[in-house]
Amino acid sequence: MSHTILIADDAEFMRAILGEIIEDMEWTVAGEASDGQEAIAQYSKLRPDLVLLDITMPNLDGTEALKAILAEDPQAQVVMITALGQKDQVLNAIKAGARDFIIKPFDHDRVGATLAGILSADPVA
Ligand SMILES: [Mg+2]
């Protein structure tokens, strides 16, 4: 069965690139969100196998959205989307329970490998 992934990033361009990577890996884009509030709502509704969560988003940032998603589902597999220069935010997110992070601009193969490692280790998948 194909893994399902929710993409939350305020930049449509970034969501499109991530969608291509996910499709190349033969996984399924469960849905998309463009801010933190929407990410939480979509997670609740879709319960994807993994969430890609941009750190910098309007309304509610990625780290706060991460906390809310994990409060609802402690088993949630969340990978942060970061840019260079966000080391402190990344560390905070990892401490809060994010599994890993991917860095913009995306290295297609590296992103695929990072997500594959998490999805294959997921006992419920
Ligand atoms: Mg952003």
Image: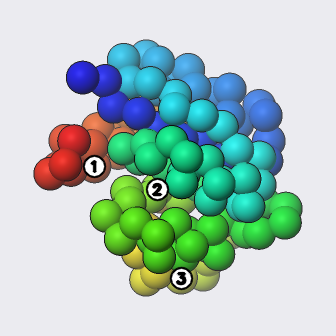
Q: Which mark is residue 92?
A: 3
Q: Which mark is residue 104?
A: none
Residue at image mark 2: 79
Q: Work out which quarter of the rendered image holds the C terminus and state it.
A: top left
Going by the numbered disc 2, the residue's amino acid type is: Val
Residue at image mark 1: 118
Residue at the image position 59 percent from the left and 41 percent from the top: 7
CA distance separating discs 1 and 2: 9 Å
Q: Nearer the viewer, residue 80 or 86?
A: 80
Examine the image and state in which quarter residue 61 appears: bottom right
Where is residue 78? Give x, y as percent: 44, 58
- Evaluate whether residue 100 shows in this view: no
Where is residue 83? Give x, y as percent: 67, 58
Disc 1, SS: helix
Question: Going by the picture, which residue comes out furthest to the front?
Answer: 45
Chain-order first, disc 1 or disc 3: 3
| Placement of 64 over or under 18, stated as above or below | below
Q: How many neighbours does mark 1 have within 10 angstroms: few (below 14), some (14-19), or many (20 or more)? A: some
